[in-house]
Image: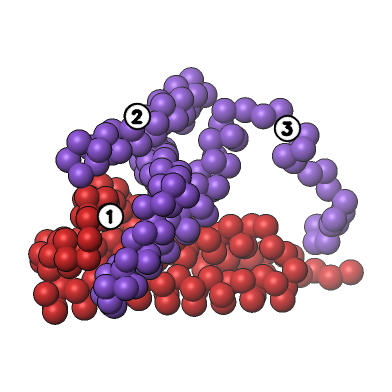
Chain colours: A red, B purple
């Protein structure tokens, strides 16, 4: 008969082992993304199919470039944390779970930073 | 106290037992749209990268996105984005402690669902007229 209660394994941890930090970050990023999304979609939507010169000119504008960088950085961080929660909720097999969590972080970081790089390259060379 | 009846406790009813409801349906849809937006976000990055790379790359990716399949994916992504954004605001309102009783949850859910359709139509109408 053990007198250890399960409390010791739960104290200080949320379901992901990090308390409310993840939850709060999601609130902060969603507050930021609400206006950012509504601004960031326009340079993309208005220049889709308009030719490369139009796209380069659009993102050479500092306002468009800064909004795009903020949207991509916060957006992909939000996406990564959201996908992490989905993986933690549905994938229980240890190897799959760890592999997918790693893959998720690397994918979102790589694609998000690639997007930021592309916008900065266009902004600085046009 | 410790380790009593572990693993032998009753579970709350799961998805297959619950009757589908507006509350659970929209909650699941928030997740589905969030996961689905991975595709739209990645496509936008591909488009930006192509524009930063060369005329040929841009022509290829831009052509892909402006094909009928590309427009279909972008239309779906717009709707997913509109729903996820509006329902996200609904979540933030709940987090501040408002609108969490059953009546309010039902009407705000229906409003978000209708609003996402209106917002999607509005965005595409603006693109249609100004683009």
Residue B89 in percent (x, y) is at 36, 41
Question: Which image quadrant is residue B24 in?
Answer: top right
Q: Nearer the viewer, mark 1 or mark 3?
A: 1
Q: Chain of mark 3?
A: B
Give left or right: position of A23 versus B120.
Answer: right
Residue that appears at 89% across and 69% down: A1
Residue situated in front as seen by the camera: B108 or A60: A60
Residue A107 in percent (x, y) is at 49, 73
Q: Return the residue at label 3.
A: B18
Specify the label residue A49 is tagged with.
Answer: 1
Callout 1: SS: loop
Q: Nearer the viewer, mark 2 or mark 1?
A: 1
Neighbour class for label 1 at 10 Å: few (<14), some, many (≥20)?
Answer: many
Is there a contact, CB below 8 Å, between mark 2 and mark 1?
no
Residue that appears at 58% across and 72% down: A101
Q: Return the residue at label 2.
A: B118
Q: Quadrant of the C terminus of chain B?
A: top left
Q: Give the distance between the C-alpha atoms of the residues marked 2 and 1, in whole angstroms.
A: 24 Å
Q: Give the distance between the C-alpha atoms of the residues marked 2 and 3, in whole angstroms.
A: 30 Å
Question: Which image quadrant is residue A10 in?
Answer: bottom right
Q: Chain of mark 2?
A: B
Residue that appears at 88% across and 51% down: B8
Question: Which image quadrant is residue B23 in?
Answer: top right
Above or below: residue A71 compared with residue B103: below
């Amino acid at each position: 008969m053990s007198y250890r209660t399960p409390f010791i394994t739960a104290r200080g941890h949320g379901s992901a082992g990090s308390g409310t930090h993840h939850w709060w970050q999601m609130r902060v990023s969603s507050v930021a993304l609400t206006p950012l999304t509504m601004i960031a979609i326009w340079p993309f939507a208005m220049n889709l199919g308009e030719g490369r010169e139009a796209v380069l000119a659009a993102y050479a504008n500092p306002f468009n470039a800064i909004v795009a960088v903020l949207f991509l950085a916060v957006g992909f961080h939000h996406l990564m944390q959201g996908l992490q929660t989905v993986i933690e909720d549905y994938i229980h097999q240890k190897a799959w779970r760890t592999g997918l969590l790693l893959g998720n972080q690397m994918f979102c970081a790589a694609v998000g930073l690639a997007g930021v790089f592309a916008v900065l390259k266009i902004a600085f060379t046009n | 106290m410790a380790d009593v009846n572990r693993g032998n406790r009753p579970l709350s009813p799961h998805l297959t037992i619950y009757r589908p409801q507006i509350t659970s349906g929209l909650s699941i849809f928030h997740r589905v749209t969030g996961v689905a937006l991975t595709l739209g976000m990645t496509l936008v990055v591909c488009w930006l990268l192509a524009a930063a790379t060369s005329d040929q790359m841009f022509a290829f990716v831009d052509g892909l996105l402006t094909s009928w399949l590309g427009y279909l994916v972008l239309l779906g992504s717009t709707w997913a984005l509109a729903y996820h954004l509006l329902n996200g605001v609904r979540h933030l309102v709940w987090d501040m402690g408002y609108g969490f009783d059953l009546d309010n949850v039902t009407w705000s859910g229906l409003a978000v669902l209708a609003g996402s359709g209106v917002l999607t139509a509005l965005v595409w109408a603006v693109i249609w007229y100004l683009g």
